[in-house]
């Protein structure tokens, strides 16, 4: 599992990045301010994890781990806002989508922030697996 953990984290980051671009550019969903923060933390991971794979550099995983942990906190907060409809001071900017809008919801609980939270946590887990093994 350790040998493939960076590759798996890379695939998760790539799918999350392409998925967010699909929803905004093709489906036409307007990202809110918290969505933008999550994008800022997810998009560079495709490059970082790609470099980690190419250079076989386990230390790059440290940067990905930090980005993923911060992203997971923001995505979790965003999901909480959606499920409780509590107004957020981060989402009062004119011209941006409200952070409490669902955009999409599947199975009664899967929203875009839940997908982002899942991706950030998966990347975190794969990064921790790689860090825990000296291979």
Image (cartoon, grey):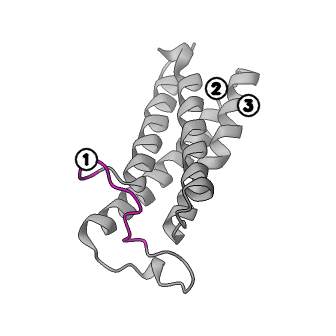
Residue 7 to residue 82: above or below? above
Please tell me which residue is depicted at 43% across the width and 82% down the height of the picture.
89
Looking at the rendering, the stretch of residues picked out in magenta corresponds to: 99-109
What is the distance, in whole Å, between disc 3 and disc 2 at their CAs?
Answer: 10 Å
User: N-terminal of the two: label 2 or label 1?
Assistant: 2
Asked which secondary structure carries label 2, the reply is loop
Q: Which residue is most to the front?
A: 27
Question: In the image, is residue 102 part of the stretch drawn in magenta?
Answer: yes
Which of these two is toward me, 8 or 110? Answer: 110
Asked if residue 10 lies in the magenta stretch, the reply is no
Q: Which mark is residue 51?
A: 3
Q: Of label 3 and label 1, which has the lower sequence position?
A: 3
In space, the residues marked 2 and 1 are separated at their CA atoms by 37 Å
Q: Residue at x 47, y 14 (%)?
A: 1
Towards the viewer: 71 or 108: 108
Q: In x, y percent, where is residue 28?
A: 56, 61
The residue carrying mark 1 is 107
**Which residue is nearer to you in this view: 54 or 61?**
54
What residue is rendered at 36% in x and 54% in y? 111
- Depth check: 51 or 17 in front? 17
Which type of secondary structure does the marked residue at label 3 adopt? helix
Coordinates of residue 135 in the picture (x, y in percent): 57, 13
Label 3 vs label 1, nearer the camera: 1
Q: Which of the two marks, 2 or 1, is nearer to us in this view? A: 1
Q: Is residue 116 left or right of residue 10?
A: left
Residue 58's label in the rendered image is 2
**Residue at 28% across, 74% down:** 85
């Amino acid at each position: 599992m350790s040998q493939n953990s960076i590759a798996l984290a890379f695939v998760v980051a790539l799918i999350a990045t392409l998925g967010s671009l699909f929803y905004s550019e093709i489906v036409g969903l307007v990202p809110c301010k918290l969505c933008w923060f999550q994008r800022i933390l997810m998009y560079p991971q495709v490059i970082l994890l790609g470099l980690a794979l190419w250079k076989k550099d386990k230390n790059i995983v440290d940067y990905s781990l930090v980005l993923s942990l911060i992203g997971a906190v923001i995505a979790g907060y965003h999901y909480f806002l959606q499920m409780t409809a509590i107004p957020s001071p981060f989402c009062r900017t004119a011209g941006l989508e409200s952070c409490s809008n669902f955009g999409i919801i599947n199975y009664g609980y899967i929203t875009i922030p839940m997908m982002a939270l899942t991706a950030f946590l998966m990347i975190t887990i794969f990064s921790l697996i790689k860090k825990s093994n000296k291979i």
